[in-house]
Image (tube, grey):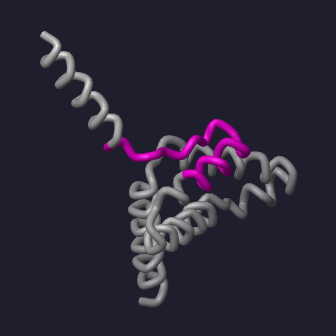
Amino acid sequence: MRFNLLIFFISFLLLGCEQQLKLNGKNKQLLRSSIAEVRDSLSFEKQQQFDEAIDITMFNSINFDEYRQLGERAASRALEKRICRTLDGKTAEQVINEAKKIKIDRLAFDEHLLF
C-alpha cells in the first residue's frame, strides 16, 4: 500500500514538472511579469526567439484604422486588451510558432502585392 502511494506521489510530481510556464494576459502588469518569468526559464537561444516572437505578435496586433476611428487613447486601450488576449495562456513555444505563422503570412501577402 505504501509502495503504491509512493509511486502515485512520484508520478504526480513528474507530471507537474513537465508543464511549461504560460503567459498570464489577465492584465498588462500580469502579462509583463509572466513574460519575464517565461523568458527567464528559457535557454539563451530560445530567449532570443521568444523576444522576437513577442515583438512580432505585438506588432501584428496593431490596427491603424482603429487609431484613426477611436483616437489614440481608446485605441491604445483596445490594443493593450488585444495583446493580452492574444498572449494569454500561451507557452513560449506557442508564441514562437505563432510568430512564425505571422512571418509566413506576411511574406505571402508581400509576394502577392509584388506580382
- Is 63 situated above or below 85? below
Q: Image point 13% across, 18% down: which residue?
A: 3
How many callouts does the rendering have? 0
- Give coordinates of residue 30: x percent, y percent: 67, 42
Percent from the top left, x then y, of residue 66?
73, 55
- Residue at 60%, 67% (x, y): give it: 55
**Region rendered in magenta:** 18-37
At horizontal 31% and vertical 32% (from top left) the residue drawn is 13
**Picture quadrant where residue 69 is located:** bottom right
Is residue 32 within the magenta segment? yes
Image x and y of residue 32, in percent: 67, 51
**Quadrant including the N terminus:** top left
The answer to whether residue 90 is left or right of residue 36 is left
**Could you tell whether 41 is left or right of 93 in the image?**
right
Q: Position of residue 87 (x, y in %)?
A: 54, 49
On screen, 5 above or below 21?
above
Nearer to us in this view, 19 or 2: 2
Residue found at the very far top of the displayed protein: 1
Q: Is residue 46 left or right of residue 83?
A: left
Picture quarter with the C terminus: bottom left
Q: Residue furthest front?
A: 2
